[in-house]
Image (tube, rainbow, N blue to C red):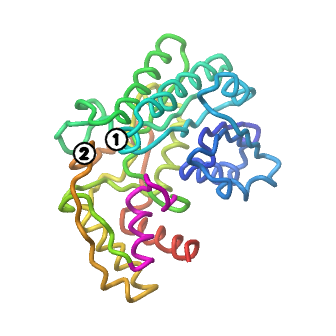
Amino acid sequence: MSMNTILITGGAGFIGSNLTEYFLNKGYKVRCLDNFATGHRHNVAPFCENTDYTLIEGDIRDLEVCQKAVEGVDYVLHQAALGSVPRSIKDPITSNDVNVSGFLNMLVAARDAHVKRFVYAASSSTYGDSESLPKVEDVIGRPLSPYAITKYVNELYADVFSKTYGIECIGLRYFNVFGRRQDPNGAYAAVIPLFVKQLMSHESPKINGEGNYSRDFTYIDNVIQMNELAMLTDNPEAINTVYNTAVGDRTTLNDLVKYLGEYLGEFDSEILNIKPVHGPNRLGDIPHSLASIEKAKSLLGYQPTHTIDNGLKEAVKWYWENLK
């Protein structure tokens, strides 16, 4: 195991840096590829003195950069992407360039380098306008945003590459991942770190809509587990497919704000009195998201370690210690 090398694209981002930390601690050699468009240097600073860690600053839209990054690599964990539904609505061309053309570059480079397996970040946005709950991998609807289209195209390309070129691919449909290192700043900050930041600043969190939309919020440690299981599984039935990466439970935005207020209130009692405000619904948002995780349990042996409750408590503690 200690001789295996993993390439983590987007390795300076929230999920990528957590994966980097985990696999370095497990004895792997880890190579990070990032252009720092959305990732942060402070996320990778703790690893730079580690002789098993290599940082390549580059863009997945450059095929030569991708080819250099995969040289001698055993596994690819592809996290690099331009996230955010609103960002893709505002600028669909750049989202497509990164998420589709960049993804194709990485697939071609991984194929030519004969990597053992290509595990990539897919998205729950692929379910689109499908109203069925819970979300089961084989039943999807029509995409509701350019971002959702790009992530579905990733799945189609991975499927074609596995059938045409024999490269082993596994997609992980992430459901609203949260946890340590998730950036609370910027126009496209995810809802949990944004709400935490607002509450810690004694500001009212702004909820899009009435707050009844629900999400299957998934703590980062569950996502790390799924990446490891997908990377290492030797079950032939588990390869060349996609998996929901979630907990199998859903929380409304109103309840989310309530929980965050309670947990942060243990550090600052004034936060207990802060009430949210409501704005219009956001374009491209799926009303409800709840994953079936039976396929991941059955084929990969997935057992989530964190519920929304203990995940939020750990995340809130991290933010309190690192944002103050």
Q: Secondary structure at mark 2?
A: loop
Place of residue 212 in the rendered image (x, y in percent of width and height, measured from the top left): 18, 60
Characterize the local packing of mark 2: few (<14), some (14-19) or many (20 or more) Cα atoms within 10 angstroms: many
Relative depth, front residue between 91 and 79: 91
Characterize the local packing of mark 1: few (<14), some (14-19) or many (20 or more) Cα atoms within 10 angstroms: many
Quadrant in which the C terminus appears: bottom right
Q: Secondary structure at mark 1?
A: helix
Residue identifier under label 1: 124
Residue, far front: 90
For the residue marked with disc 1, what is the amino acid?
Ser
- Asked if 109 appears above or below 197 in the picture, the reply is above
Place of residue 36 in the rendered image (x, y in percent of width and height, measured from the top left): 63, 45
Q: Which label was assigned to residue 286? A: 2
What's the residue at 22%, 31% (across, down)? 141
What's the residue at 43%, 46% (across, down)? 302
**Residue 171 lies in the magenta-colored region:** no
Place of residue 137 in the rendered image (x, y in percent of width and height, measured from the top left): 30, 34
The range drawn in magenta is 183-202
**Residue 192 lies in the magenta-colored region:** yes
Place of residue 270 in the rendered image (x, y in percent of width and height, measured from the top left): 38, 88
The Cα atoms of the two marked residues, 1 and 2, are separated by: 10 Å
How many numbered tags mark residues here?
Answer: 2
- 277 vs 42, left or right, is left
Name the image quarter holding residue 92: top left
Kindly check if marks 1 and 2 are in contact, taking CB atoms under 8 A apart as contact.
yes
For the residue marked with disc 2, what is the amino acid?
Ile
